[in-house]
Structures are given as structure tokens and as C-alpha cells.
Amino acid sequence: MENRPTARNSYIETLRAFFCLSVLFYHAGVLQGGYLAVCGFFALSGYLSCRSLMKENFSFIKYYAGRLRRVYLPMAVTVFLTLAAVSRIPDITWVSEKPESVSVLLGYNNFWQITANLDYFARHADSPFMHFWYIAIFLQIELIFPLLMRLLLKAGGRKENVFPALVINLTAAASSAYFVYASFTMDTMSVYYGTFTRVFSFLIGAAVSYDASHTENGKKGKTAAALFWIFGAAMAVMVFLLSSDSAWYGLYMLGFTILCTAAVVSAFGTEGGTAPLPVRILSDWSYEIYLVQYPVLFIYDRLCGEEGGTVVRTSVIAAASVLLGAILHFCVAGKTKGWAAKALRICLCLLLAAATAFGMYVFAVTEDHTEEMKALDEELQASEEAMKLKQQEFAERAAEQNAEWEQKMDEILASGENVEEIVGELPVVCIGDSVMLGASESLMEKFPSGYVDAKKSRTAWVANAILKNLKEKGMLAGTVIIHL
């Protein structure tokens, strides 16, 4: 989303605008397949980055300086502005504020989110920085890939040498195979946040870019335009229909990446042209809109407390994200003509600088609760181990106890005995998050015949799957307590 070709291409701008809206409405809870658009951003970035790296007058200094100005600077400003805004809102609990902010600024937020066990697919704003895993992976790739690619091109020597093509295509294929394998065998969030799993989209884009540069015949035609819209329509269908909770999500992401690269190749096979103004605007602002949308979500949900993809919530979040993204783009990367526009930009930049400076102050004085969180993690780990032992005991006697309790309850109700006195002996099933995990010892003491399944950072998104699993194992008791 932050790589832009020097000459405007209406089809590339259309793709970028489409990806921008898909991700925005996915985060707002409207599009169930919007997560796929991130693969499109990776593939498009890989394609355009490779085109830049193959230029004869390529300069590492200009390349990295451009990434610093266009990628890192707006991200850092967004981090400090978010810290400033959140600090002024009372009753917001964000215990990981300091370590999470550091992980974003130092470019390893994706790994931090893996260790924090945050669930991106839950689409719940547990943090205003949940979407920065993508920027972290992109920065990591862009730090290493240009060096390796230029070395590969140098080793290849002449343009017709097949060595670079062989290496980059085999690497892209191997990376894709590893991603698909991991999607079926590894923890979902470890796959989704992992640099080595997610790099496949970028590498496919880069490989196709390299191959296309050696096969282009210079002809532009209507066939390429028609193919672009066919590939685009297929991606739109995927965004609307393919949910992330499917076991096939890895194949969906691979398929979307392939369609995206095919669309990009088709786009460069057209005459280009000029996109409609709204499309150009969304394309230009797409990166900044991406940066601000989760902070907007986080603050809105805590101020308004409105859950779900309602019309009002979605409209406010979308409008605020576009407006704030426009201001950020105008100040950091925008071009101005005329004294009025320049004066406005200077005023906005001064306000932005003041707010950023305050955010830096907030960052400096914010306490790091990492040690306290580690101690809490140890306590929760001990509770989890005790809970697992209790689960095993429950599974062994669940079916027999359920039948016994059904008979006993019938007898109690018929005799008129006090039911409250024996509630503690019921085989209650409890499903919850870190709060319940912390209370699991008390729950198991209260319900010695019960079953507790609790985990940190769990949301209601996974409750249905847990209940189905317990039912299949015959462990779902008549009384279920859910705290998510």
C-alpha cells in the first residue's frame, strides 16, 4: 500500500483502493473476507518493490530514505498520536501500552502479538495497535529483501541469465508451500502473524514482477483490461464470502495472492489511464487510512460501547478513518500548491507536531508492567495446569455423572428438597477468558465435579467451536457458564 509507481496507473490505483476499503470494513466487522486484502497489499508491494530494485540507476540510500519517510514516519506519528489521545480518555485499561508501543516502533509487533496471544480474526479492538503486525512484517522484509535481491541480480550478471529467475521463483514456491502446510498444522495466529509464513505473498509478487519484466513485449491492449476486471471480480467475491474461521483459510489467502498478482500483471498490460477522483484519493491515502483505523476503532468502542457492525458504528469509524488518514497524508506526504494550501499544511503540521510531542511524553512516562504481567502469566499458567488435570478427570466421568445427576435432580425436585445445598456438586461446564482462568481455582473448589476451560485473550468468537468440541466428546453438561 505504500509502494507507488512513478507513473499513475488507474488499474493499480483501483486495486489499492479496493484493498483499502476491504481491510477497513473487515476491521469494522462488515466484510468477513476482508483479511484477504492484506495478502493483496503484500503481493502488490512485492511486485512494485522488485520493479524498483531492477532499475539500473537504483540507489539504496534513496530507497531506504523513501521507506523511512513514507512508511516509518507516518507509523511513528500515528503511535504517538494514539498514545496522546488514549491518555486523555478516562477509565481505559491498556496494561500492555508500553511494551506494545515499543514493539511497534522497533518493528517486531507481529512477534509481540504472537507471544501476547492476540486474536486478529476475533476483530475485537483489544489494542489500538492490533493491525501493526502487518507494518512490522513489511519493515522486516523491506530491510532484508532489497539487499538480497540486488545481490541476486548482480550474481545473475546478464539480463538473459536464468539464475535470478530460478532462485526467486523457487523461493516463492517453497514459501507458498510452507505457508499452506503451516496453515493446516500450526496455531492460526502464529501462521497469520509470522514473518516466515506471511512472506509468501510478497515473494510471489516479486517473482511475477521479475518474470514479467523479462517477458513484456510493450504491447498494450483491451484484453489485459478485461482480464484485470475478471481477476478483480473474483477477488471481490472472495472478500465477501470467504470467512477466516474456515480450515481452508490458508488456501484462500494463497488463491487471493495469485489473483492479485495476475491482476497487477494485467494492469501493467493496459494503457493505464486516469482513475476517477475518489479512487485516486483512496489509493493515495490508503496507507494512512490503514494506520489510523484501529486506533479509531479502539477509542470509539470504549467511548460508545457499541458492539457489532451496525450502520452507525461502521459509518462513524469509516468516516473518521478516512478524515484522519487524509490529514496525516496531507501533513506527512502530501504535495501543496498555492499559498493557502501551504499555510493550511503548516498549521496542521504544527498541531500534529504538538500532539506528537505530547504523545512522546506520554510514552516516556508510561510505566512498563511487563514484570507484573510475567508474574500474572505464571499464576495463570499454574491455574491452567490445574484446570487441565481437572478436565481430564471430568472427561473420564462426564457421561456417567450426567446420567446420575439427571436421575438425582428428578428425585430432588419430586421430594421438594433444597436444591441450593447441592448445586455445588453439579458437573458445571465453565468456558472463559483470562478472568475465568484467574478464578479457575475458586471455581474448581466450588464445583469439584465441574469442568473449566479458560484461556488468555479468548473472545466470544471461539465459543461455538469449543461447545461443539465438548458436545462431540460427550462432555457438555446441562449447566454451562460462559464468560467471554
Image (cartoon, grey):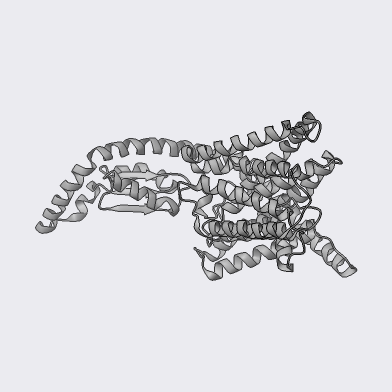
- Asked whether 478 or 184 is in front, the reply is 184
Left or right position of 237 against 43: left
- Which residue is rendered at x = 66% and y = 40% of the image? 203
Left or right position of 63 against 434: right
- Which residue is rendered at x = 40% and y = 49% of the image? 432
Residue 114: quadrant of the picture: top right
In this view, 174 is above or below 465: above
Residue 172: quadrant of the picture: top right
What x and y, as percent, mark residue 374?
52, 37
Determine if residue 79 is in view.
no
Q: Among all residues in the image, which is located at the extreme left?
A: 415
What x and y, as percent, mark residue 396?
25, 37
- Which residue is rendered at x = 54% and y = 66% of the image? 304
- Asked whether 29 or 422 is in front, the reply is 29
Q: Among all residues in the image, which is located at the extreme top?
A: 155
What x and y, as percent, mark residue 232?
62, 58
What x and y, as percent, mark residue 478?
25, 52
- Asked whether 65 or 313 is in front, the reply is 65
Image label count: 0
Left or right position of 1 against 452: right
Determine if residue 436 is in view.
yes
Q: Among all residues in the image, which is located at the extreme right?
A: 339
Left or right position of 230 against 150: left
